[in-house]
Image: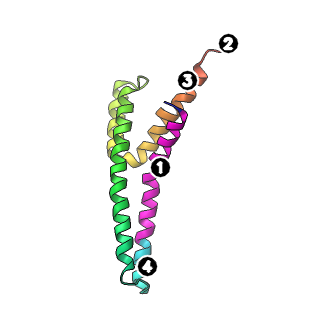
């Protein structure tokens, strides 16, 4: 896999974590605005629909990332069968946290190990 693809995949893996921060900030903003009486009638609906569509797109994004990582797990010959099943379970149940870890250990570091293992001429 090219280094540029690995970087793009790494950034794509970080989006769900960034989205959680955006979502929680939006929720806290909405609650504080309602408590202070600072919301105009049309404004909350725009923000709600914007965050709703971002939420749907992020969920689809996570599913696509899960498929990409699952296919990488089964194509990666350096991972043993037992560890493959473990990574599948970990990515399925803890995907937002486990995906960046898997990316770093088995996608990003893979290229570094190959460079270090090359015989010197």
Instruction: Please tell me which of labels 3 and 1 falls first in the chain.
Output: 1
Dominant secondary structure, magenta: helix
Magenta span: 3-27
Asked if the stretch drawn in magenta spans residue 21, the answer is: yes
Comes first in the chain, label 1 or label 4: 1
- Element at label 2: loop
Dot label at residue 14: 1
Residue 46 versus residue 75: which sits nearer the camera? Answer: 46
Q: Would you identify the image quadrant in which residue 41 lies? A: bottom left
Q: Earlier in the sequence, mark 4 or mark 2?
A: 4
Disc 1 from disc 4: Cα separation: 28 Å
Which residue matches tag 3? 114
Task: Determine whether label 1 and label 4 are within 8 Å by CB.
Answer: no
Cβ atoms at labels 1 and 2 below 8 Å apart? no
Q: Secondary structure at mark 4?
A: helix
Cα–Cα span, label 3 and label 4: 52 Å
Marks 1/2: CA–CA distance: 38 Å
The residue at 33%/50% (across/down) is: 60
The reply, left or right, for residue 67 in relation to residue 1 is left
What residue sits right under mark 4 in the picture?
Answer: 32
Query: Circle 2 is placed at which residue position?
Result: 121
Mark identifier at residue 43: none
* Tag 1 secondary structure: helix
Q: Say few, some or many: other residues with alpha carbon within 10 Å of mark 4 (under 14 / 14 to 19 / 20 or more).
A: few
* Residue located 43% across and 79% down the image: 32
Indicate the quadrant where residue 78 lies: top left
Whether residue 40 sits left or right of residue 116 in the image: it is left
Ranked by sequence position, the earlier of labels 1 and 2 is 1
């Amino acid at each position: 896999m090219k280094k540029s693809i690995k970087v793009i995949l790494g950034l794509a893996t970080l989006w769900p974590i960034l989205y959680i921060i955006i979502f929680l900030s939006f929720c806290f903003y909405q609650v504080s605005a309602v408590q202070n009486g600072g919301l105009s009638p049309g404004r909350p609906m725009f923000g709600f629909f914007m965050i709703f569509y971002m939420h749907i797109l992020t969920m689809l994004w996570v599913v696509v990332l899960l498929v990409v990582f699952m296919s990488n797990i089964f194509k990666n010959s350096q991972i043993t069968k037992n560890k493959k099943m473990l990574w599948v379970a970990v990515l399925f149940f803890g995907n937002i946290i486990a995906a960046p870890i898997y990316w770093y250990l088995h996608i990003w570091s893979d290229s570094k190990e190959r460079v270090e293992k090359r015989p010197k001429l």
